Image (tube, helix red, strand yellow):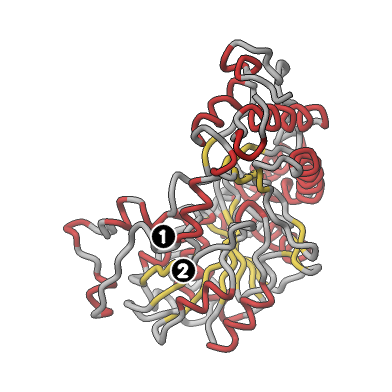
Amino acid sequence: MKASLKSLAINGGPKVKNTPFTRGARYGETEMEQIREVFRNGSLSYWSKFKVKSFCEKVKEYFKCQYCAGGSSGSAVIHAAVAALEIPPGYEVISSPITDVGSLIGILYQNLIPVFADVDPYSYNITAESIRKRITNRTKAIIVVHLAGNPCEMDEIIALAQQYNIPVIEDCAQAYNGIYKGKKVGTIGNIGCFSLNESKHISCGDGGFAITNDEELYYKIHNYLDKYYDRHQRGCRMHHLAPCYRLSELQYAVAFAQLDKIDAITTARRRNAELLTDKIKHNQAIVVPKVHPHSQSSFWFYMFRVKPEKINCSLSDLVEALQAEGISAVTGYIPRPIYMEKMFAEKAFFPGGIWPAEIISSRTYDYGRGLCPTAEEVLSSSIRIPISEFYSKQDMEDMATAINKVLNVYQNKKYFGGS
């Protein structure tokens, strides 16, 4: 017989998760020793080339790429990557509607037009098919977002981009060690951008880096991260307007130590996520996230969908019930597709209600409900829960038990029967 409402913790029933989730220390003696070396070297400036150089060399070795440039955040390096393409103002860049605004800041500050392609309903990533529908003669770049570490289908996207001669930037902020057909994400497009924010797989508090195999793109990215100063003595001092996105030696020092932990962190997260999927995938009210057989997700978070027609409550009711069971659940990754936020809906990117890019393009762009219907459906039917490399097997089993318990209680009798 199906469990009753009284069995839920939110209604006074026994709570599933009665013990704290397992935690661990992100930083330790290895990071501290790197910081001590910075002080022994006597300079905190990134251009002292102690830690910045060793960090970038280590990144190049890990990703098997030729060039690495570091910056103050993942958003900063995406901005520099967009700027390095030197697209004239008023042209378009295609990206995902399910992403952090950091993926889009660089587009807007370069006076370019964000265009949103819809997502796959099961992987939550943009696809070549959805991108193709958005390509116009004004499309000058594509930014793919490997959401939560789940790789986009890159072969199809790269083939489409090459057909139209459009460069591809990979937003890998959430995707350390995401693997697509044996390749690390970030090494497949023209530029790969990573975040070192405190919340990411590895961190130095705040920071980021971009990788590429294109020498000219590398120098331009580097210049756009540092006021377009001629740091490499190439005779291009301040040729273009560029922000100051420098990172200090202290942050690079911590990031250097953190790089050694990527494989262990992502292996543990993947193991925990796969255990959870195995425990909840048979629940008829749930759609687990799809990871293609030729890919490996690094699971920055875990987000599953609920079939609305198969439950008899709201998504927020489910989330509240899960929280009462001891699970840190929230609705969706972001509340709504990014284009539905006030900044986009009202095109309030700059003071005075003036959007220079739209004026330059001599076109009008509208952002609002209905632009990417699948993305809207995904976010309105999704529950996100955290995944950690520190979580134990028992933690994951408790999480699965709570999810199945709550979803089974709120099953729609029309589909499941019982009382």
Residues at discs 2 and 1 in contact (Cβ within 8 Å):
no
User: Does residue 246 appear in the picture of this structure?
Assistant: no
Quadrant for residue 149, please give it.
bottom right
Percent of width and height locating residue 85? 48, 78
Which of the 4 image quarters holds residue 21? top right
Q: Earlier in the sequence, mark 2 or mark 1?
A: 1
Density class for disc 1 (Cα within 10 Å; few <14, some 14-19, many ≥20) is: some
Residue 325's x, y, as percent? Answer: 64, 21
Disc 2 to disc 1, C-alpha distance: 14 Å
Q: Residue at x 46, y 54 (%)?
A: 376
Residue drawn 66% across the image and 48% down it? 287
Identify which amino acid the numbered label 2 is placed on.
Answer: Tyr
Quarter of the image where one finds residue 163: bottom right
Q: Residue furthest left?
A: 352
State which quarter of the image contains the N terminus: top right
Q: Secondary structure at mark 1?
A: helix
> Looking at numbered disc 1 in the image, what kind of residue is underneath it?
Ile
Above or below, 326 against 239 in this view is above
Residue at numbered disc 1: 105
Seen from the viewer's position, the closer of residues 395 and 371 is 371
- Horizontally, residue 351 falls left or right of residue 322, namely left
Q: Nearer the viewer, mark 2 or mark 1?
A: 1
Q: Which mark is residue 245?
A: none
Secondary structure category for the residue under label 2: helix
Q: Nearer the viewer, residue 328 or 412?
A: 412
Residue drawn at 54 percent across, 53 percent down: 247
Q: Which residue is mark 2?
A: 224
Establish if 179 lies above or below 205: below
- Picture residue at 57% right of the left edge, 17% below the top: 10
Q: Nearer the viewer, residue 246 or 14?
A: 14
Q: Where's residue 189, x and y in %?
A: 63, 74
Residue 411, image x and y in percent?
A: 62, 33
